Image: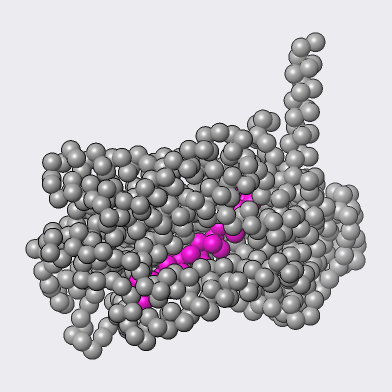
């Protein structure tokens, strides 16, 4: 198991709408949220939380272009330079019949590349065990977490008060 | 999803479910010992697999001389089965990708099982061209790798090679899409499990935590994968149809093939989803709250649409054969309908064109028994379609002295049963070890499509109308 050497204060909420209101209120008061954990993608949470749009689709485009260029230029090289053969009286450089494979390879590269990128940037992968706060988060609990490493007791209690004020069902501190 | 839902839209989740109950309902089958029916089903599929393994060994050991293919009919049950399984494998990605782009919420109830079905069906499909090569241990020759024979490359102009790329890309992308959706749900099972099970689910859930940033990337990834899979799923059966359409055989050399094959694939794929969904929700009764009659009806609508497209395509083929004035084309179609294989042509017409028309009637669309029977009839019909296209176009070729008749040997039948055994076994195992409904995705539509929320919305809007009247 990886450790982050952090002390985390977190509050658990029982509903996604309560969570959204809580995040909004906490951020409006100028507090920095370390992370929010939810059992499913809560729509509308990202802008409230101040998350920038994911750039994974840009990576996908780059991988896709790599696939297009590789497949098309490879077939061109094989049939015009390396081993030219006439098939059915067609020219060596017969673009229409290169299209299906070029397309398939583009999709393959874009998909495989994006999925690998996704797991790498999220720090996920086969056998990885990330530290987690509460097992109920993957069931029906919604969690707002603060990084309170090295913070004074008063600061921690102020944040805890804020969680309780925004209807957190319970609050805990955990070292991860 | 902050809900903008028409109040006339019926609920997709019934039984007043809470988030926790969804977790319970869908995870519990993976946490209990299998019941007797499941074991009996597994024994049955293992029996098929066992018999099929014998015929597979015969096929590989003695070569495809153990089949009754002949010089005239070079493609028989093998390629028929290949196209049939690939066609079935289209529904999963169609449901998960195209319906995601169209924001169809009923997708969430069935996408997981449909994608699993897709992956297993493509595995079954890929077996047939493999064994048809005769020397399956040399099957890697189809890939363009640097070799010591020149290097001699594969023929990139051949539709058969396009097929290699299409099927392998489709399999890979479907698998990645499916698994990425499974990761958060495996994490849910992990967090409920103890001991050794926890270790296993910890491994397969990739360390998922449910962080907001991860969910954001996960959704972005799903959306782009859906965008990529949509043209992909349409391209796969298009390319399969090119195997036939780019040839010069009357009955195959037809420009209508790509759209007609794609419609047929969706048609048979949805039928197979219906068969499996109905059986799965008998085995796991609580699933009836997630796979409702609403879902069944939606899929039946797709079946009646695509079945009718296929019907129009059959008639168009006949018309064009006559209208072309080309005697060989005309003979191919005359021979299809009235030659020695007339029975397969009428089985195809009856099962594919006439049987789905029952689904114009709403009460039949929402009837599980009718749906189940018709879903099987449709898949029988779609098997005959491929048999008709392949065998009847080949068996009476340009040279009457080489005309032949073809029927399969027991080995060919056994090879087909092998894939049934494999498919059934894989699906039964899947049902026990993975959530058959996408937990996270169902939770995300609960507040817009759960029955209690829909009813509350209805009461509210009725009260409003009442007020307006006073």
Residue stretch rendered in magenta on the structure: B103-132
**Nearest the camera: A88 or B4?**
A88
Q: In the visual, does B426 lie left or right of B77? A: right
- Pinpoint residue B146: horizontal percent, then vertical percent: 27, 83
What is the quadrant of residue B440 in the picture? bottom right
Q: In percent of the image, x 53 and y 76: which residue is there?
A: B49
Q: In percent of the image, x 45 and y 66: which residue is there?
A: B122
**Nearest the camera: B132 or A19?**
B132
- Pinpoint residue B455: horizontal percent, then vertical percent: 77, 34
- Pinpoint residue A54: horizontal percent, then vertical percent: 55, 57
Q: In percent of the image, x 80 and y 45: which residue is there?
A: B16
Color encoding of the figure = one colour
Quadrant assignment for the C terminus of chain B: top right
User: Above or below — where is B48 with respect to A106?
Assistant: below
Q: Is residue B279 magenta?
A: no
Q: In the visual, does B178 lie left or right of B190? A: left
What is the quadrant of residue A90 in the picture? bottom left
The outermost residue toward the front is: B340
Residue B159 appears in the figure = no
**Nearest the camera: B198 or B32?**
B32
């Amino acid at each position: 198991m990886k450790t982050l050497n952090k002390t985390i204060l977190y509050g658990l909420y029982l509903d996604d709408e309560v969570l959204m209101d809580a995040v909004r209120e906490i951020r409006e008061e100028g507090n920095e949220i370390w992370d929010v954990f939810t059992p499913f993608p809560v729509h509308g949470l990202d802008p409230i939380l101040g998350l920038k749009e994911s750039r994974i689709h840009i990576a996908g485009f780059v991988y896709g272009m790599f696939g297009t260029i590789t497949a098309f230029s490879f077939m061109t090289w094989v049939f015009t330079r390396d081993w030219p053969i006439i098939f059915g009286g067609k020219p060596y450089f017969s673009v229409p019949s290169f299209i299906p494979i070029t397309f398939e390879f583009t999709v393959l590269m874009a998909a495989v590349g994006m999925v690998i990128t996704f797991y790498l940037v999220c720090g996920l992968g086969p056998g990885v065990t990330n530290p987690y706060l509460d097992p109920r988060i993957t069931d029906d609990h919604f969690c707002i977490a603060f990084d309170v490493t090295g913070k004074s007791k008063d600061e921690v209690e102020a944040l805890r008060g804020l969680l309780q004020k925004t209807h957190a069902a319970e609050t805990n501190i955990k070292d991860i | 999803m902050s809900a903008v839902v028409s109040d006339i839209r019926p609920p997709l989740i019934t039984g007043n479910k809470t988030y926790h109950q969804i977790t319970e309902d869908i995870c519990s089958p993976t946490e209990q010992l299998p019941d007797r029916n499941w074991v009996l089903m597994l024994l049955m599929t293992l029996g098929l697999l066992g018999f099929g393994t014998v015929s597979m060994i015969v096929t590989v050991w003695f070569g495809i001389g153990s089949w009754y293919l002949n010089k005239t009919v070079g493609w028989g049950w093998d390629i028929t089965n290949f196209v049939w399984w690939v066609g079935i494998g289209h529904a999963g990605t169609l449901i998960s990708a195209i319906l995601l782009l169209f924001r169809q919420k009923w997708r969430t109830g069935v996408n997981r099982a449909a994608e699993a079905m897709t992956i297993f069906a493509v595995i079954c499909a890929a077996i047939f061209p493999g064994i048809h090569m005769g020397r399956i241990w040399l099957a890697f020759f189809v890939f363009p790798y640097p070799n010591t024979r020149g290097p001699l490359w594969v023929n990139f102009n051949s539709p058969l090679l396009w097929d290699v790329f299409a099927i392998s890309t489709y399999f890979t992308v479907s698998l990645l899409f499916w698994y990425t959706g499974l990761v958060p749900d495996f994490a849910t099972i992990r967090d409920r499990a103890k001991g050794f099970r926890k270790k296993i689910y910890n491994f397969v859930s990739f360390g998922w935590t449910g962080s907001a940033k991860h969910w954001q990337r996960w959704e972005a990834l799903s959306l782009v994968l859906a965008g990529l899979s949509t043209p992909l799923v349409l391209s796969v059966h298009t390319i399969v149809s090119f195997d036939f359409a780019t040839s010069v055989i009357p009955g195959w050399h037809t420009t209508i093939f790509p759209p007609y094959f794609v419609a047929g694939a969706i048609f048979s794929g949805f039928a197979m989803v219906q068969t499996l969904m109905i059986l799965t929700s008998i085995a796991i009764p609580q699933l009836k709250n997630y796979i409702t009659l609403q879902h069944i009806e939606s899929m039946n609508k797709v079946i009646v649409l695509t079945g009718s497209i296929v019907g129009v395509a059959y008639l168009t083929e006949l018309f064009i054969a006559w209208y072309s004035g080309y005697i060989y084309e005309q003979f191919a179609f005359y021979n299809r309908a009235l030659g020695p294989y007339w029975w397969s042509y009428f089985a195809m017409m009856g099962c594919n064109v006439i049987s789905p028309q029952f689904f114009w009637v709403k009460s039949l669309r929402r009837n599980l028994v009718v749906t189940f029977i018709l879903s099987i009839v449709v898949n029988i019909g779609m098997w005959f379609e491929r048999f008709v296209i392949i065998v009847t176009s080949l068996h009476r070729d340009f040279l009457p002295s080489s005309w032949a008749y073809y029927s399969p040997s027991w080995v060919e039948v056994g090879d087909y049963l092998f894939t049934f055994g494999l498919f059934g076994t894989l699906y039964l195992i899947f049902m026990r070890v993975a959530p058959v409904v996408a937990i996270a995705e169902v939770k995300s539509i609960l507040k817009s499509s759960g029955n209690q929320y829909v009813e509350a919305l209805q009461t509210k809007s009725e009260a409003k109308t009442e007020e307006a009247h006073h």
